[in-house]
Amino acid sequence: MEYKEILFTLQDGLAVITLNREARKNALTSRMRSEITHAMRMAAGDARAVVLTGAGDAFCSGQDLSDAGNNGGKLDLERTLRDEYLPMLQAIYDCPVPVLAAVNGAAAGAGANLALAADVVIASESAFFMQAFTKIGLIPDAGGTWFLPRQIGLAKATGAALFADRISARQASDWGMIWEAVSDAEFDAHWRARAAYLAEGPTKALAATKAALRDSYTRTLAEQLSEEAHLQGQCGKTRDFLEGVTAFMEKRPAKFEGR
């Protein structure tokens, strides 16, 4: 696929997907969703970590309400969510390697929930998150009603959804909505260092960690302990485990191969 509304790079095991409609605050179009989905699937097969970020001073302002895609000039919200948002968000959420959202500015509406679909969210202090949907007579979509209660609890999720207030990056970090807020001056170097750390890490162990944490919500303690034993047994057979133990004994940094 030829990318026109995103930028995609893959170097040293790190894939970076940049939403690239700067003049429109990286608002989501039908084409952009298709490109993100395609890039995520490519990265899932080739990368050891993935970053989602935005061009310019915004991460993503949400759905471009002037874009009707291939629907005859009229935006069909139900079809768009089922046929375009669902595969995009599923590709992000199901990616076997860590996905980091580097939120460089405004993340509003579907843009906020696009970020929350990632495993880890790092935001610049000037960034904010906003469930803007009720301002135009809609409900939170793009996974908002699923991600928010799990990340910040029902009370704060309900307030964020009903009032559609701006939530600063610092507040989002304090609430547990995101991993961390970083000063604007340090933001770019910081997320790149974090992303490189993941890309250089023990890939199979990171994937197993993601799976174990997510699936814990559907298991009893005994079931989870059994699954931990199973996954740990698999990790213990990897070259990365051998390298990690050897490096520890030799008092040197580990050089993981991702296998």
Image (cartoon, helix red, strand yellow):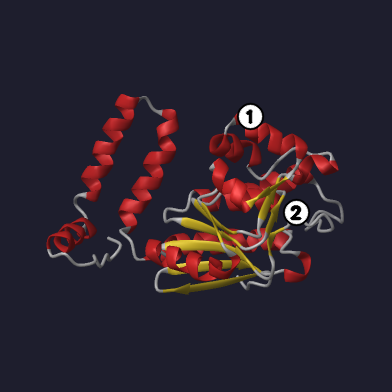
- Comparing 65 with 58, the one in front is 58
Q: Which amino acid does label 1 sit on?
A: Ala
- Up the image or down, 6 lies above or below 111; here it is below
- The reply to whether the C-beta atoms of the residues labelled 1 and 2 are less than 8 Å apart is no
Residue in the picture at 75% in, 41% down: 164
For mark 1, what is the residue?
A: 155
- Can you give x and y, in whole percent of width and height, for residue 190 in the image? 48, 66
**First in sequence: mark 1 vs mark 2:** 2
Callout 2: SS: loop
Residue in the picture at 84% in, 39% down: 137
- Can you give x and y, in whole percent of width and height, for residue 115 in the image? 60, 53
Crowd tier of the residue under label 1, counting other residues whose Cα lies within 10 Å: few below 14, some 14–19, many 20 or above? few
**Badge number at residue 122:** none
- Can you give x and y, in whole percent of width and height, for residue 97 in the image? 42, 56
From this viewpoint, is residue 101 visible? yes
Mark 1 or 2: the one toward you: 1
**Badge number at residue 63:** 2
Residue in the picture at 80% in, 46% down: 76
Crowd tier of the residue under label 2, counting other residues whose Cα lies within 10 Å: few below 14, some 14–19, many 20 or above? some
- Up the image or down, 214 lies above or below 32; here it is above
Residue extending furthest right?
73
Quarter placement of the C terminus = bottom left
Callout 1: SS: helix
- Can you give x and y, in whole percent of width and height, for residue 257 in the image? 27, 66
Q: How far apart are marks 1 and 2 (CA)?
A: 26 Å
Quarter placement of the N terminus = bottom right
Q: Which amino acid does label 2 sit on?
A: Gln
Tag count: 2
